[in-house]
Amino acid sequence: MRKVLSTLLVALLCACEPEKPSSPSELRILSIAPTQQSAAEAKTVTVELDLDPRFLVDYSAQTARLLDQPTLQVGSQTVPLERYLGEGRFEGTVPPGLGVGTHDIRVSLPDGREATLAQAWRVRPSVGFWVESIGPQIQDRPFIVTIHASGTDAEQFEGTVTLSILWLQGNAPSTRFQSGPFANGVRRQELEINTPGNILLRLEDEEGRETYSNAFRVDPKH
């Protein structure tokens, strides 16, 4: 293990001189992943830069310290990219608290170089959901289900949810599909169920959180 570590430190020292180059190359952001978060969550992000970082090696302690540590700015949030993953990729965590919408990202280096991507980060509203009560329905007859977003950012939600139709008895397979977009935090979704029985609707958002409707009956058509 000591031999492997020593070899790594020598390689870092040989490949990365601590002196700054006389003519630093232009900094470029090659990619960022993911590209969005909800307003209430922290999100770990990986930024790939067109950069070969330099390290300062301490042979006695057998450590290597990153000299060109970049800083990511997402909107008003400052994110130190403290973890180097290799091949120009750096990792940090964007904290919650950004406003809903899109934000520019900027990466800066200690030597003053910067790179910017406009409108590259999206913050989704942090919302929950609930479904208005559903009464008895008739097989093969369309009806409307009204879904509400709830929470501080509910009226700004314009995304979608995944709907599943679940049969509480029998062997009918569940049906899963994407809703249409919400408007001002509300979605009126048309459904048509072709198998009679007792039904439950399940909603799932982009973060995997689930919400259920009341159970309702679908009677056979006559």
Image: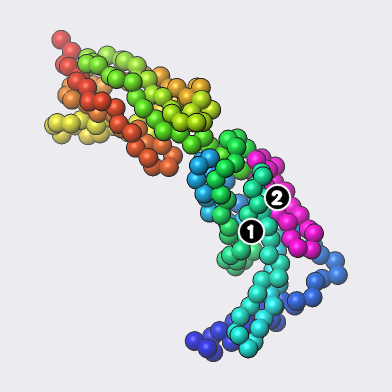
Residue 65's label in the rendered image is none
Residue at coordinates 51% horizontally, 31% vertically from top-left?
153
| Colour scheme in use | rainbow
Residue at coordinates 27% horizontally, 14% vertically from top-left?
141
> In terms of secondary structure, where does tag 1 sit?
strand
Disc 1: which residue: 80
- Judge from the rendering whether residue 92 lies leftward or rightward of residue 166; answer left or right: right
Q: Is residue 65 visible?
A: yes
Majority secondary structure of magenta residues: strand
155 or 222, which is in the foreground? 155
- Judge from the rendering whether residue 130 lies leftward or rightward of residue 64; answer left or right: left
Residue 106's label in the rendered image is 2
User: Please, is residue 12 above or below residue 185 in the view?
Assistant: below
Crowding near the residue tagged with mark 1, few <14, some 14–19, many ≥20 C-alpha atoms within 10 Å: some
Asked if the stretch drawn in magenta spans residue 115, the answer is yes
The amino acid pointed to by label 1 is Pro
Q: Are marks 2 and 1 in contact (CB under 8 Å)?
A: no
User: What are the residue bounds of the magenta stretch?
Assistant: 103-120
The amino acid pointed to by label 2 is Arg
Asked if the stretch drawn in magenta spans residue 164, the answer is no
Where's the C terminus, which quadrant? top left
Spot occupied by residue 76 in the image (x, y as percentages of width and height): 67, 44
